Image (cartoon, rainbow, N blue to C red):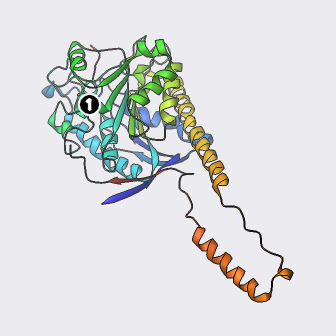
Amino acid sequence: MAVKIVRQPKKIALIGAPSSAAAFQAGSEKAPAALRAAGLVDRLKAAGFEVHDYGDCPQRLFADDDEHRRARNLPAIVAGLNDLKLHAETAMKSGALVLVLAGDCAQSIGLLTGARRYYKHLNLIWFDRDADLNTPATTPSGRIDGMVVAHIVGRGAPELVRFWGETPLVREPDVLLYGISRLDPPEQEVLSKSPLRHVTAEQIAAKGAEKSASDALMQSHADTRDFVLHLDLDVISSDELGAVNVPASGGLSLAEVRDSLKKFAAHKNLLGLDIAQFNPDKDADGSAAKKIVELLVEALSARLAAADSIEQAETATSAQTAPPAQPEAPLHEVPQPEVAQHEESTAAFAAESEEPVSTEAQGVEHESGSAPESDASSEPA
């Protein structure tokens, strides 16, 4: 059955996914609470967004799980994704931008699954230092966070590959890896043979973040395809943000990440964004949390500015195309019978030309089917 979703570019549906079950260490399950405590919701509201907070899913915690060394903690990961999927489906149906405060990167699977409930074709921009293309057969660690993209495109543990119900969750040609600078040899081999698109951190630094992000949107056919964005905060150099699970110097600067994120967030076809890998256990003074909140608010404010520009353009167009007002003849020059006739004619014209109130000032009406579509992570050493 078709569902009509009216896009609401000035609304945010916020979901916490406090999980470290797929991560390389404990602590990232505290990220949603830490970002809320740093004032994220109030800052988004002050910027001009209407925020609907769906609260947090139950915590799913890191464990070594030495019994399953090739794919650790799978039951806890799958349970967490089932929780997030339900929230994401409800939030996606509201038409708001869905913002997931995630602990580990695996939560992106839950967001994508919630989006696929209503959108048959999705693209994915994976904004990450790592490609996350390992599988249980190639992983050096067994941590699912180093394998998430592989599972999204249909390779890996059956519990995750089939989480959506059919494979793949997103097709390889519809995934773009943005900002990568760490690749394991098996991942390099996958990229050499795969239709996956990728843009390295080195290329972004050479071309400029804003131009690189614009080109990435073009490569992803964002003007005609809905997309989801994943942001792993370890893409930022540890010189500027070290409170992540696997920090490293190099990569992208905070400014380059912000400029790229602003371009992505402003696009009308962005359905949802999840941020991952912030570890409050490494942020004793709370400065990293404040920096992340500032990054998100500044980037998402570009979405508000884009929505305002669209509204102004539509208002101007409506004013230019509106039919001219029909002047009424002075009553003393028109015999009484003709006055009655004129009033009836004017009423009929108004009834015929009256248009429904446009939803485009708030968003874009999208009709999508609920039926699924018929139709490959680098981890640090």
Residue lying at 15% horizontally and 36% vertically, measured from the top left: 158
Residue drawn at x 16%, y 25% as measured from the top left: 136
Residue 2: x %, y % from top left: 33, 58
**For this rendering, which residue is in front, 367 or 136?**
367
Q: Is residue 326 left or right of residue 272?
A: right
Task: Pick the quarter of the image with the C terminus.
Answer: top left
Please, which residue is most extreme toward the bottom here? 337
Q: Residue 33: image x %, image y %?
A: 45, 37
Q: Quadrant of residue 352?
A: bottom right
What is the x, y in percent for residue 212?
46, 21
Name, please, the residue furthest toward the right: 332
**Looking at the image, which residue is at 24% across and 32% down?**
153
What is the crowding at mark 1: few (fewer than 14 residues within 10 Å), some, or many (at least 20)? Answer: many
Q: Is residue 24 above or below residue 352?
A: above
- Label 1 element class: helix
Q: What residue sits 19% from the left and 25% below the top?
A: 135
Count up the numbered dots.
1
Is residue 201 placed above or below 146 in the rendered structure? above
Residue marked by disc 1: 172
